[in-house]
Image (cartoon, rainbow, N blue to C red):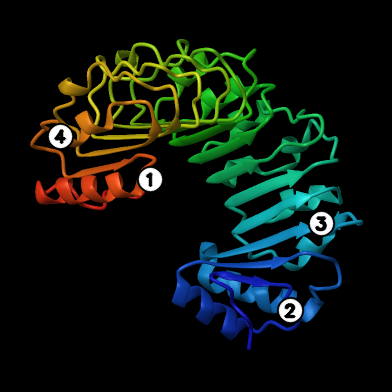
Amino acid sequence: MIEVDGNRVTDPAVLSTAEIVEAAEKRGRLVVQFSKSGTYPLASLHALNDACGIVGERIQVRFYGHYGAAFDASTLRNLPEVRDLAVDCLADIVNENEIGQLPNLQTLHFGVFDMNRPDFLTTIELGRLKRLSLSENRKRNIDLSPLAAAGLLEELFVHGHSKGIGSITEIPGLQRLTLSAYAKSHPLDFVASLPSLKNLTLILGGREDIDDLSSISLEMLQIIRVRGLGTLGDLSRLPALSALRVEDQLQLGCLDLGGANLERLWLFNCKTLAELPGLASQHRLKEFRASGVALDMNDLRDRDWPSATRSVHLFSGSRKWNDNAQASLAARGLSEKGELWP
């Protein structure tokens, strides 16, 4: 029997197609991962490949770790049915062109720290991919220009790379974009040319403002741990925005909501955030969360929330206050759990 921890099977000694399929169907999604060479005998790879052919994207095959050795991607010749592949958290790789030979690949998570292949994306059949994640390498030098050919791409995560980023404006159906450690010297104005973008996350990196960010389609924006950010500016340049999450922004003293029309607002660990002008005009607001902020928590607890509001969760430094506030809000019908942030 295979051992499943959560939804992961790690370095299995033996794999059988039937057990993998059963586990994937039971959990909805299964990650079968290998951390070192020698842990994926040919028979197991063939069984895993057959399972991928049966349940498709419900199985992710992952190769990671391999400490002290390079991952040999020629192993992937035994997995032509894989749809979801992660080759990440690796120091080095050889025969990386084999990734581009996988005929059914739809999702790729890639991160090899010591690989120096700026042209790596030219080796991938990008026209098949729906989801792509590119973690940083030592030089952060992967050229993103080939992404113009990724016509089916719906989700993109990029950490540290920026050369050719404007090419993604050629992707008609890109809905979700995460820019991690995106250099402040590179503008965000290209976002306005992404016609289908619904969800944008900015994480790490640094910039003083995001005034060059605009979009008529963006519905969800997350800004997490972006150093030096002191303002979000006039949110009317994001007219479709309905959900905003701001987290770990220590320079943000005021968040002006006057130009917004939000349904969900989450504020976490913004220790100098003391003002929310425009909160009273958020008549569509269904959910509000605040923790680790300088806002008047008593005022937030006692305010007249809009009739649309169903979920208010407030967290101060006092457990007693938190419990009392939650009881008070529950008595007013404002204690629903709310939605999980996607």
* Figure quadrant of residue 311: top left
Residue under label 1: 341
> Which x, y percent locates residue 223?
47, 29
- Mark 1 and mark 3 lie on one chain; the one further toward the N terminus is 3
- Cα–Cα gap, marks 2 and 3: 16 Å
- Mark 2 and mark 3 lie on one chain; the one further toward the N terminus is 2
The amino acid type found where label 4 is placed reads Asp
Which disc is residue 302 wearing? 4
- Cα–Cα gap, marks 2 and 1: 36 Å
The amino acid type found where label 1 is placed reads Trp
- Cα–Cα gap, marks 1 and 4: 25 Å
> Which x, y percent locates residue 268?
42, 35
- Cα–Cα gap, marks 1 and 3: 35 Å
Q: Are marks 2 and 1 in contact (CB under 8 Å)?
A: no
Q: Closer to the camera: disc 3 or disc 4?
A: 4
Which disc is residue 73 wearing? 3
Q: Closer to the camera: disc 1 or disc 4?
A: 4
Report the side of 223 relative to 69 (left or right).
left
- Residue 128 or residue 41, whichever sits in front: 41
